[in-house]
Image: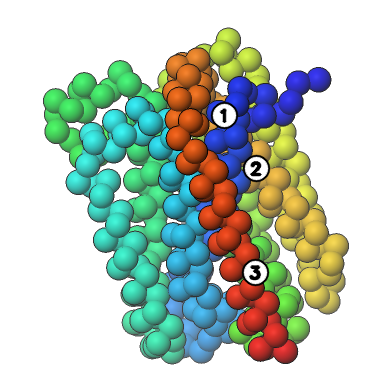
Amino acid sequence: MSMPFPFDLAWPTSGYLALYLVTLLMHALFMSYVLGGALAVAFVRLHGVRENGPVTRTFIDWLPFALSAAITAGVAPLLFVQILFQREFYTANLLSFHRWMAILPVLIGAFYLLYLLKARPHARRLSAAVASAVALSVIFVAWSWIENHMLSLDSSAWVKQYESGALAYRDPAVFLRLAFWLALALPTAFWLLALQLRFGASGAKPEEAHFATRRLAPVALGFLLVAAALAPFVLRGTWSLSPVDETRLAGADVPYLVLAAVGVLLTLGGWLSSQHLPRLSGLCVVLGSLGLALTWWGVLCARELVRLARLDLDTLTQRHTELATSSGLVVFLVFAVLALAVIAWIFDRVARSLR
């Protein structure tokens, strides 16, 4: 039996891909929390609610941390995608240079806006405006990354894109992919919030946590089903670019789409079981969290398999072998271990102080 993806590939491509997928998963979870939280706060405030219930209170408290964590966690996958797909990634960057670089000021603005939101949590109109601006900023960043990804794979469009001087890659499928990632991000954010409420984040009482979980469940389930319906079409390229060459893909992504489907079912089980219990039980936590992890892992692996099927894998492997001689991977792993140790120490100190 061959090794599962990405370990079925030659070294060091397999190592780079594994680290890329793991770090991208961490980044996606944090960024999903920011997007879902900002949209939830904006929705509540636009409906005229002044007081901070457990949902808005927890989101407002934790959004600044979540965005800073998302940005920090996004550095590693950004480094690895440059190594893995150097020619394609940099070409897409250069073709949409000014608008691509707009990601930086947009994220900086969103970061400071979240602290304004936290400083004035009861100002209804200000909260609605700030939360909406943050959500739109995150959506802009997501759109930019999707556009960059699709342009990097559409080499036939590079010359035309350069000659026209266009700053945007005009393909309607960009917005379809954006809808898919948004539909997956929102239930992710709501599940992470449900876990926070279960453990009393922002002073949430058990009855508040249960009520909030019951209110969030229908919304999360709806978006999760939308994401599940879009996944096969968006990831396999049927509604994005041209259909991928099945002879090169050879169904390698099917097990991961199945894995994602199992994850969706487990997540659904976690949400549904929470509706019939007085609190989010340990079984609900395990079901939902495991389901969420499997869903994201299956989706990300399927996405990368489709990308590899569009590129020359032999050329990529040779390039990665040359890059591996620079010892950059060793340096990354050393500092990654140090960073994780520091983060664990900080969490331990904070937990001791709270107790």
For the point 57% across and 79% down, which residue is it?
58
Which residue sits furthest top? 247
| Residue position marked by numbered label 3 in the rendering | 344
Label 3 residue SS: helix
Relative to 196, residue 242 above or below: above
Distance from the alpha carbon under mark 1 to that under mark 3: 29 Å
For the point 18% across and 35% down, which residue is it?
166
Tell which circle, 3 or 2, labels the residue nearer the N-terminal end: 2
| Residue position marked by numbered label 1 in the rendering | 12
Disc sitting over residue 263 in the figure? none
Label 1 residue SS: loop
| Residue position marked by numbered label 2 in the rendering | 297
Which amino acid does the dot numbered 1 rest on? Answer: Pro
Judge by depth and name the residue closer to the eye, 13 or 94: 13
Tag 3–tag 2 contact (CB < 8 Å):
no
Tell which circle, 2 or 1, labels the residue nearer the N-terminal end: 1
Q: Residues within 10 Å of mark 3 (few under 14, many from 20)?
A: few
For the point 56% across and 62% down, which residue is it?
339
Relative to 66, residue 223 above or below: above
Label 2 residue SS: helix
Is residue 62 visible in this depiction of the protein? yes
Q: What is the quadrant of the N terminus in the image?
A: top right
Q: Nearer the viewer, mark 2 or mark 1?
A: 1
